[in-house]
Image: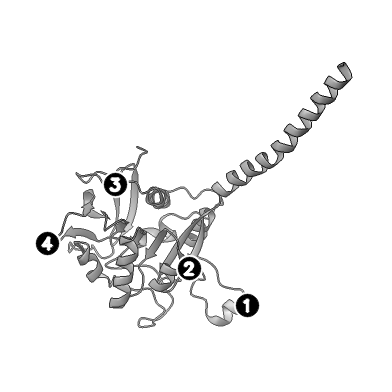
Amino acid sequence: MQRNAKRLWLAGLLLLLVAAVPAFYWYSSDRTAGTRPSALVLMSSIDLQWGEADLGALARGEGNPDPLFSRLADAHTIIAVDNVAQLQASRARVAMLVQPRAFTPEELVRLDKWVRAGGRLLFFADPALQWPSDLPIGDPARPLFTSMHSPLFAHWGLELVLPMEPGAVSAETKVRMGRYAVRTLSAGQWQSLKNADGQCRIADQALLAECRPGKGQVLLVADADLLHASLWHSSIPGTDSSANIDWVEQLLVRLAAGSRVVGKDGEILDRPG
C-alpha cells in the first residue's frame, strides 16, 4: 500500500511539473513581451538618424546619429519616416515630429485624419529654429527655419507666434513646465484663434498646447531647439539627466498612456493620477 501511494504521489508530482512548464513559459514570454520597446514614429527636417553626412560618408559608415536619436532609441523602436503616408502605414500609435518639412495639403489632411482616428502626436514646431547646420542656406536638406504648418494648427484652433521683444529670436530662456525647468532657445508661443472650438488647452507661458481632435491626442511644443544636444547632452556616459530630455520622455510616456498633460486652468499635469 505504501509503495502504491508513493508511486501515485510521484506520478502526481510529475504531472504537476509537466503542466507547470508551459505555464511558466507563457508567463515568462508575456512578461518579456510587455517590456519590449514601444514603437515611435520619428519625422524631422533635421537628419537625426544619420547627421549631415553625404552619401559617400554614409557608404563608409561615417554617419553619426544625433544624441537625441540615440536617447530615444534606448527606450523605443524608432521608425524613421519621410512622409505622412509612411506614418500611417507604420501602424504605430505614437509619433514625434521635430520641425518636419512642409506638408502638401493632402498630407495635412492625412495627418489630421490619423490623429482623429486615435493617433497620438508629439509635435515640436519652431517659429525660428537656431539648430546649427553646415549646409548652405537654400540647401533643401538644411533644417527648416520656421514651421510651415499653420493651416493644420489653425484647423485645430491654434496659432504659432514668435514674441517680438528685442532679442527674442536668439534668446535662451527657462520655462517652468510642472516640475521641469526647460531651457529653450527662440521659443514661440501658442495662441487660441477666435473661432477655436475648445478642443485645445494652452499651458501657462504658452510653450505647450494639448489638443484632443476626435479620438486622438496632440501635444504641441513651440520650440524644437530645446532638443538640441547643447541644451541637455553630456559628454560623460550615463549622466544625461537634464530637465529638457526628462520632460520630453515624460511627455511621451503620458502620451502613450493617453493621459492629460494640460489642466483646464493651464497647469501642467505631470504626475500620476
Residue farthest top in this picture: 2
Q: Which residue is mark 2?
A: 80
Spatial CA span between label 2 and label 3 = 30 Å
| As drawn, 24 above or below 97 | above
Task: Answer yes or no: is residue 134 visible.
Answer: yes
Callout 1 crowding tier (Cα within 10 Å): few <14, some 14–19, many ≥20: few
Mark earlier in primary sequence (3, 1): 1
Spatial CA span between label 2 and label 1 = 21 Å
Give the label, 1 or 4, closer to the camera: 4
- Quadrant of the snapshot with the C terminus: top left
Callout 3 crowding tier (Cα within 10 Å): few <14, some 14–19, many ≥20: some
Residue shown at 49% from the left, 60% from the top? 67
Q: In terms of depth relative to the viewer, which is nearer, 255 or 5?
A: 5
Give the label, 2 or 3, closer to the camera: 2
Q: Secondary structure at mark 4?
A: loop
Residue shown at 25% from the left, 65% from the top? 169
Is the C-beta separation of discs 3 and 1 under 8 Å? no
Q: Which residue is mark 1?
A: 60
The amino acid on which the numbered mark 3 sits, given as a three-letter code, is: Arg
The amino acid on which the numbered mark 1 sits, given as a three-letter code, is: Arg
Q: Which residue is mark 4?
A: 195
Spatial CA span between label 4 and label 2 = 35 Å
Mark earlier in primary sequence (4, 2): 2
Q: Position of residue 178 (x, y in %)?
A: 31, 43
Q: Secondary structure at mark 2?
A: strand
